[in-house]
Image (spheres, rainbow, N blue to C red):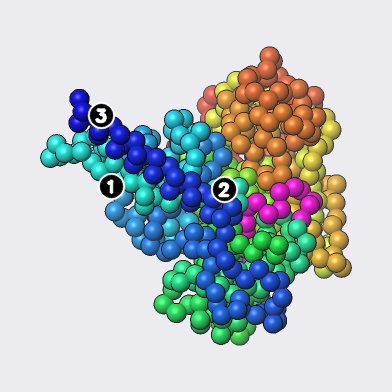
Amino acid sequence: MVKIKNLSIILSVISLFCFLFSYYILLSSTGTIKPEINQSRQHKSIHAVQESHQPIDRHHIITSHQPYAILLPDWEVLILLPPHAFSAYAHSKMMCQFQNNVISAAFFSGIIPSSGRSSFRCILPKSLHRIRPFLSPRLISTSITPDSSSNGSQEPQFDCYSAPEMMRWTRLVYDAVTTPQDVIIFAKGLNKRSGTNLPVSDVECVYLSVADGRAATYAAINAAQEVFRCPHPTSKDFNILNSSSVVRVSLAVATNKTPIPTLATYSPPRAPVKNTKMTNQSLICACTMVFNVAKFLREWVIYHASIGVEKFFLYDNGSEDELGPTVSQLLVEGYDVSSYYWPWPKTQEAGFSHCAAVNEKTCQWMAFIDVDEFVFSPAWAASHQPNHSMLASLVEPIGRKVGQIMIYCNEFGPSGHRTQPKNGVTQGYTCRRRSKERHKSIVQLRAVDPSLVNSVHHFKIKDGFETKRLPSVQINHYKYQVWEEFRMKFRRRVSTYVVDWKDKLNLNSKDRAPGLGVEPLEPDGWAYKFCEENDTLLRDVTRQWFGTEESDRRFKMKWERT
């Protein structure tokens, strides 16, 4: 009994030490304990390096060879592995082992394009929701459990001494894009309200050496929403920071100087191409953010490709369906569709900013529409077949000063359906609200303002350009689908500044469904709601364009799988 009691005391002391050590890490990360760094706002020039390349708190620097974890909303954990490490996990079912040795299933999520890191998702156990700090879990194979192994001995327990604290999604640099002129940084937590941005003079760009923590600091060029533009580091500064090391890029508020945690790596700009005019630039492309839309994707791509969209850019917001195989099949069939893994929650505006920035040389015009939205002109109903000039006819005659086309939406309801129409949304949903609501835009990318500010529906454009409304064109928005599908919207809204359906805020906003509460409970009569006017025009047109009538008078559509 004495030995057991002594062992219990020893374990209690160790646990207390673990807690105090972890608490110290938390204080360091939140700025309660701060490293001594140069706090002066004065620079020798806009491109000056911090005096003596003084090291900063390396807790904010992620090395290239270590895995790390980010705590996302809804207690979701995203684990990022070192580049090229996925092969070690490819053939095993994985689990997350947390600091109290509780495990939860881990699922492969995707590969971050900018870093090459593979990602896994798991859920933080409820037993840890009130424990601080949140330490990064270990990623382990299901063939090795915490309480057993092949030789009968126990698997080593979670090591709280070596586990870093999870990064918090509320304040994080999550991506960066290098352009010939500057570096575009995407960061959560600095501009928290729509239309309210930090003064650009209060934002600093920080380039960090992973090897030794040295930093070079520059004044930001632009700061709006979650997008920040920074100057490239001088070649001298970069050579100092890049001595056999990865250089990360972060942001700091001038009054604090402590860089926020960052995932983003700096890449120097490529040598400029002599002939900058791209002869193969597409006239019209489409960009959208997607989550579990594979079952709708073929209809959307085949329809819009037939009327003139040449390239499709899908920002994958952590899909768990057959998106990958569906995209692969569309590529085999000759459609130019690419998927960009973008796991960051509530970042639709930033995703669209990213899409506009990286595709300016690839596409002249970009349609920013969702997969349940179809561009249509009633005048096209006279055509027996679709043709690629249909969308071109909207943008080519309007003049060089028009930077953006605004198109209003018809919002369709469930149209009496209780299960998803098998042959497509254009075929099944034929009853809509009478008044047009909201709008979407087709944007000329060279006209987009350098701030890349957008409200999802439209972009801020440069001075000298104008936005033009096209009343002869509409978007059929199949917004209110069968309840089984619509209730998925309660998971999370993708827009940064639009409250989630479950939040008891802005209850009268047009971003909500009229008469719908904050719980995912099917209202009485849902199947017949939002039905004020029958509208079968696009259904009939697409049957003529893409359908084959079968013996039972059912139309087999081109996008249906055989």
Q: Nearer the viewer, residue 457 or 285?
A: 457
- Amino acid type, label 3: Lys
- In what element is the residue under mark 3? helix
In terms of sequence position, does the residue under pointer 3 or pointer 2 come before the other? 3
In terms of sequence position, does the residue under pointer 2 or pointer 1 come before the other? 1
Tell me the number on the disc at residue 91: 1
Residue for badge 2: 169
Tell me the number on the disc at residue 117: none
Residue for badge 3: 5
Q: Residues within 10 Å of mark 1 (few under 14, many from 20)?
A: few
Q: Residues within 10 Å of mark 2 (few under 14, many from 20)?
A: many
* Image side of residue 273 versus residue 42, left or right: left
Task: Judge whether 364 appears above or below 288 on screen.
Answer: below
**Where is residue 21 drawn, in percent x and y?**
43, 48
**Where is residue 162 drawn, in percent x and y?**
36, 52
* Image side of residue 350 versus residue 101, left or right: right
- Amino acid type, label 1: His
Q: Nearer the viewer, residue 158 or 529?
A: 158
Q: Nearer the viewer, residue 310 or 541?
A: 310
